[in-house]
Image: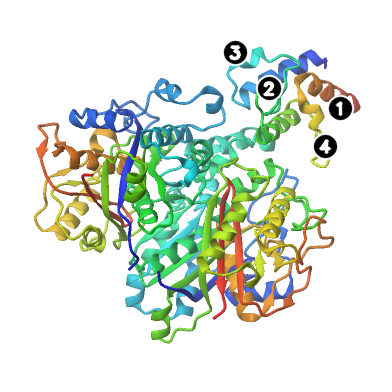
Amino acid sequence: MVDRKTVVVTGVGVVNAAVVGASPALGAWLAQPRAAARVAVGHGRPAARLPEATLAALIDPNEARRLSRVCQLTIAAARLAVAESGVDPGRGLGLVVGSELGDFTSTIAFADGFLARGAAGLSALLFPNTVMNTMAATTAIAVAARELSLTLNVPTVAGELAVARGAAAVAGGRVDAVLAGGVDELDPLVAEMLDALGDDAVRGEGATFLVLESEGAARARGATVLGRIDGAAWRSLPARPWGVGRRATSRAVDEARARAGGGAPGWIYASATGDAERDAWEARVLAAALGAVPPVASLGGLLGQHGGLGALRVAAAAWTARSGLLPAAAGGAHARVSGPGLVHGLARGGGHVALMVSAP
Amino acid sequence: MRRVVVTGLGAVSPFGSGVKAYWAGLAAGTCAIRPLTVIDAGGFRCRIAAEVPEVSSGSPRRSRADRLALGAAVEALDDAGLSAADRAEAALVTGAVGGGMLEAEAWYWARARGERPPGWAAALRAILPGSHAEALGHRLRLGGPRHTVVTACSSGAVALAEAADLVADGVVDVAVAGGVDAMTRMCFMGFNALKLLDPEPCRPFDRDRRGMSIGEGAAFVVVEAAERARARGARVHAELAGHGMTTDAFHVTAPEPEGEGMARAMRAALAAARVSPSAVGYVNAHGTATPQNDRIEARAIARVFGEGGPLVSSTKSMIGHTMAAAGALEAVATILALTQELIPPTATLVTPDSEVTFDCVPRVAREAAVECAISNSFGFGGQNVTLLFRRI
Amino acid sequence: MEAKEVIDELKTILVTRLKFDPRRAAEVAATTPLPKGVEGSIGLDSLDFIELSIAIEETFGVVMDESEDLTAHFASFDTLSRFIVGRRGRA
C-alpha cells in the first residue's frame, strides 16, 4: 500500500436554496436547520430551487453572460471555498466535480434551437455545455485550477464520490490541494423524467465544494483546518441500472474505517432522500457494516437531493466533529455525539461511498 | 506504487467488431470516414463520419453506445482470461460523454413532431454518461469500485489513467477501463456549428487541413498489478508505465496557444514512468486536424521531445475523432504499435505543415521497434492527458 | 438595407444570441470595439464571434467562408454593418 498523507479540509463553499456561504454560514444553518422553501418546477413535484436573485448576486453580470446556470452555481461555491481556505491555486490545484445530471438545461435549449430553426438555430455558445465537463472546465478557468480535473457522473452519491476521489488524490501525493464537490441544477423536464422513473427523492439544487489538502501543506502555510478525512473508499453493490440491490455487505465502509485506523463511527450522515426503497437498502447496508448503528442524520429531506449534497454532508461532518452536535432527523434537538463519524452514500445502481471524518 | 500492466484488449471501431479488425484497418492505412447513415446530415456542410459498420453485440433494446461498450468490454475480459472471482473484485472506470443520447434524441425529435413516442423513460434512463458503467458492471458482474469520468475528448484516456491509479495504489488488483461514444445528432450538429468539421476526411498535420471528422466506437482494456499478472501466467500486452493529467484553465473550447498544459501532461507522464524523452519512439497524437490543435500540439511535442524526435501519427485520420472512446481506442492502437512493431500512419497526410518538425508517418504504416510510446488526448475545456506505454 | 438598420439588428443579436443585458446592448455605439483585449471593448471572444457569424448568416443571409480572414470587419458594428451591406449588395 502506498504511504498515504493525511487529508484535511481547509475551505467550504455552499450555494443552495437554504444556505449560501462558507463554513460559518453552513455551521449556523446546521445549528438551526430549516428546510429550503419548495417551489413548483415544471410538472414535477415541488422542489427546493434557488431564487434567481441569490445567484445573480454571486456572479458578475459580464461573467454570467457566458456561464450557464449550473456553471454559475459551481463557480460561486468553488470561489467561496477557495477564499475561505486561502490556498494559492498557482501552487497547484486539482478539481473534482460530481454531478448527477450535468447541464440538462443547455442540452435541451441547444436541441430546441435546432428543432425550431434548423442549422441556423444552433448556438455555438450553448454547445460546450452539452458535455458534462462544462462545470469543471469553466470553474477551472474561474479559479485557475491547472492540475488534474475530473467530472464524475453517478446518481445520488456524486458529491460523496467527488470528495472521496479528491481525497485519494491528496492522500496519494499526486496533488497538494484539490477542490472537490458536487453540483446539480433543477430543470423542469428532468423533474418530470425523475418522476416517471419512480424516483421519489425530494429534489433540490445547488453546489458544495471543499478544499482538501495534505495536512502537512495546510499546516505549513498556517491554514485553518476545519476537519480531517481520515479514510475514504468507494465500491459498488450489485444492482440493476437504476435499481435497488438485495445484497447488504459491501467493503466500502470497512475500507474507509481501516484507512482511518479502524475505529467505529460515533455518528453518521447518510444519503437518505425520501426514495423509500433506496433508503431501506441503505439502512440494511449500514446495519450489515456496523452492527449497532449510531445516530444518523441525512439533510436530504431539508435541502433536496442534488449532486452537491454529498459534499455538503462531508462539510457538515467536519462541523459535527468539531461541535459534537448532530442535527436530528425530524427537527428536534441535536444529538450529542463524539468521536469520528461516517459519511455514507449509496445509489440506485449500486454506487457506494464511505468517508470517515474527524475533528482537526 | 505497483507496476501496472495491460492484460486484455477489446475494441469496436469504424473498422468493425474486434481488435483484429481494428488493427487490420490501422495497419493498412484505411480511411473509414464515409457518408453518414446513422443520423440525417441533411443541411450541414459536413456529411461524413466514421461509423461502426454493424453493431451486433448486446440486445437491440439497449442504447447503441451501451452495445458498443459491451462488445469491447466482453472482448477485453475474454482476452485477459479473468475468472468470475477476478471480475467480482475488478474495478470499472468508464469514460463517456454522449451516453444514450442518440436514442433520447430520437425520442425528443419525435415529441417535437407532435408524436407520443413510447419507451421514453428507458431512453432517458440510459442518457447519462454514468449509465454505461451501471450496464457493464451489472451485465459483466464487475463488483469492485466503479466510477465514470466525463472529461470531453479525453474521457477514454482519463479512464485508463484512473484505473492505473487504483491498481498502483493497491486499492484493487485488477481494473477494467475504457471509453465509448456513439454517433449523436447533438455532437455532429454542434461541431458543425462551431465550424470545426472538414467536409472531406480530416487531414491531421497537413498544411491544408480544415478540421475534424467525427467517429464512434468503444475500447476497453484490463489492467493488473504486474506481479499478479505474472503469477497467474497472464499474457501481458504492455506496461502502462505512467500518465500525466493537466488542465489548461484557459478557454472552454480553444486550446491555450502555447500548449503549456499539453507539454506539462507529456512531461508528467515521462516523469511518472521515469523515462527520458529519447526513449519514446512513437507519439499517437490527439491530432484532430483542426488548424489550432495540430499546430499547438506539434509545438508542444517539439518542446518536450526536441525537433525530429519520435515518430508521430494521428489515427484520427482513419477512424475520426471518436469522442469519449478516442483516448481508449488510441491507447489500444499505441499498445499494438509496440507489440506489432508497426506504427500506424497518418493516412490522409499529403503535404505536412511546415510547422511540424517530426516525421508524421504519412499514408503508409512504418515498421519500427520502439521501447516506449505515448498517446495524447486533449479534451475540450483544456483537459490534457498523456498515457505512456512500455514494451514488456 | 441601410447600415443603421443593420446595426439595430446586430444589437438585437447581442441580446438574443450573445446573452447581453438589453440596456448594455443599447449602449453599444457604432464605433465601440467588439473584440476582447481592446480597450473599451464589449469583450467578445472567439466563441462569441462564431455565434455572431451564425446569427449574421441567419438574419442577413450573408454566408461567410472560414477560409476568408474577416477579422477586420468584426472590429466594430460600424465595420461589420458596412461589410454586411456590401455583401448583400453583391448577392
**Mark 2 and mark 3 in contact (Cβ < 8 Å)?**
no
- Circle 2 crowding by C-alpha within 10 Å: few under 14, some 14–19, many from 20: some
Placement of the N terminus of chain C among the 4 image quadrants: top right
Q: CA distance from mark 4 to mark 3?
A: 31 Å
Indicate the chain on which mark 3 is placed. Answer: C
Could you tell me the amino acid type at mark 1?
Arg
Indicate the chain on which mark 2 is placed. Answer: C
Q: CA distance from mark 4 to mark 2?
A: 20 Å
Placement of the C terminus of chain C among the 4 image quadrants: top right
Q: Nearer the viewer, residue B25 or B241?
A: B241
Mark 4 sits on what residue?
A: C69
Mark earlier in primary sequence (4, 3): 3
The residue sitting at 65% across, 12% down in the picture is C27
Check residue C23 in the rendering and tell me which mark sits there, or answer none.
3
- Circle 1 crowding by C-alpha within 10 Å: few under 14, some 14–19, many from 20: some
Residue A235 relative to residue B174: left or right:
left
Residue B380 relative to residue B287: left or right:
left
Check residue C87 in the rendering and tell me which mark sits there, or answer none.
1
Position of residue B257 measured from the top left corner of the image (x, y, whole percent): 68, 45
* Callout 3: SS: helix
Q: CA distance from mark 1 to mark 4?
A: 15 Å
* Callout 2: SS: loop
Mark 2 sits on what residue?
A: C41
Indicate the chain on which mark 1 is placed. Answer: C
Mark earlier in primary sequence (3, 2): 3
* Outermost residue toward the bottom in this view: B233
Position of residue B143 measured from the top left corner of the image (x, y, whole percent): 33, 67
Mark earlier in primary sequence (2, 1): 2
Could you tell me the amino acid type at mark 2?
Ser
**Mark 4 and mark 1 in contact (Cβ < 8 Å)?**
no
- Between circles 1 and 4, the one closer to the viewer is 4
Could you tell me the amino acid type at mark 3?
Arg
